[in-house]
Image (cartoon, helix red, strand yellow):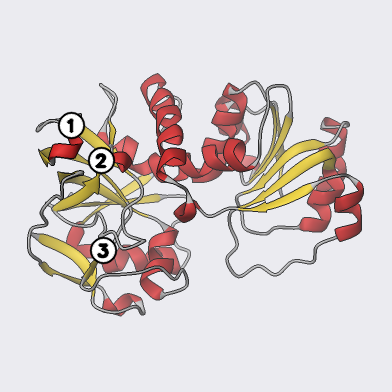
Amino acid sequence: MYAAYIEERGPVEGIRYGCLPEPRPGPSDVLVRTVVTAVNPVDTFVRSGVYRTPLPFPFVLGRDLVGTVVEAGPGAAEFQPGDRVWCNSLGHAGRQGAAAESAVVPADRLYRLPDGVRPEDAVAVVHPGATAYLALFTHGGLRPGETVLVRGAAGNVGSAVTVFAAQAGATVVATASGRDTGRVRELGAAEVLDHHAPELSERIRRVAPGGVDVCVDTSGRNDLAADVELLAPRGRIVLLAGVAARPELPVGPLYMKDGSLRGFVISRATSSELAEAAQALNRQLAAGRLRPRQVEELPLSEAAEAHRWLEEGRLHGKRVLLRPSGP
């Protein structure tokens, strides 16, 4: 089979495209023929070694796929050949990745694609969508009636955070570029503020006078001084972006508010946590509430170029999809 792979951790120039042996499913695995896969920032972290995880070499890149079941092991009898399925947790912890014509997926990390959902739409949102769900509910403990501050609400993760929070009965206060205000409101935000506006914190306080119960900064700026100041009593800040960020933490105000700060990386999510997120994702996909803003398709042979775009910051919220047979 053709695959995009590496033979050691390192820069983008180490990505290879060529033939590798067809994988074989184990007793509780499913062999999936890949229809389309996506490229995520975390894929570049794994490839480069920024995120350390066991890698079998040659190592196939990629985390997400939508595809069709070819064969299921005896311990994966719930899947049948021809089923349309998706996964968003390959390519780390010793698992080979998704950027190949075929992939072996553990049955407890594989989910059915809802009827009527395009593979391209699904694969573009399952990673940011699961990140959003886990940040809000597993780590943020969001409850109906609370107020959520979403910084960077027009991005891939921010959009999903906004949708999930609004659907859960929370009041969403969002920040985004002025040109994205209308779109973020359509996602369910009650208030949308331009993140370039002067005195932004004061504007947030005016629309959320009781404080913010959950703060999710998807931009990676992580201005903890401002976020702690905006917290309601027992408010929670969830950190999920900004791998190189080193902000100062106002410890006194945080503990005086009985607040908490949680770091979260989806690569450490358990299979049961991912399965819970997948159920919620499938409901939103089936309802048409989660859709990618903009995608660009490349053939699988251009995986190195996709990684280069990500690392150079050239995508600006656009999702890059790879097709084993080309676009």
- CA distance for labels 1 and 3: 29 Å
Whether residue 252 sits left or right of residue 100 in the image: it is right
Q: Which of marks 2 and 3 is in front?
A: 2
Separation of residues labelled 2 and 1 (CA atoms): 8 Å
The residue drawn where x is 66% and y is 35% is: 141
Is any part of residue 180 visible from this angle?
no
Tell which of 276 and 145 is nearer to you.
276
Please name the residue that numbered disc 3 is placed on: 303
Callout 3: SS = helix
Q: Is residue 317 left or right of residue 161?
A: left
Residue 232 occupies quadrant: top right
Q: Is mark 2 on a helix, strand or loop?
A: helix
Between the residue at mark 2 and the residue at mark 3, the CA separation in whole angstroms equals 26 Å
Residue 213 as seen in the image, left or right of residue 280 = right
Q: How crowded is mark 1: few (under 14 residues within 10 Å), some or many (20 or more)?
A: many
User: Which amino acid, mark 2?
Assistant: Ala
The residue to which callout 2 is attached is 107
Do the residues under discs 2 and 1 have CB atoms within 8 angstroms? yes
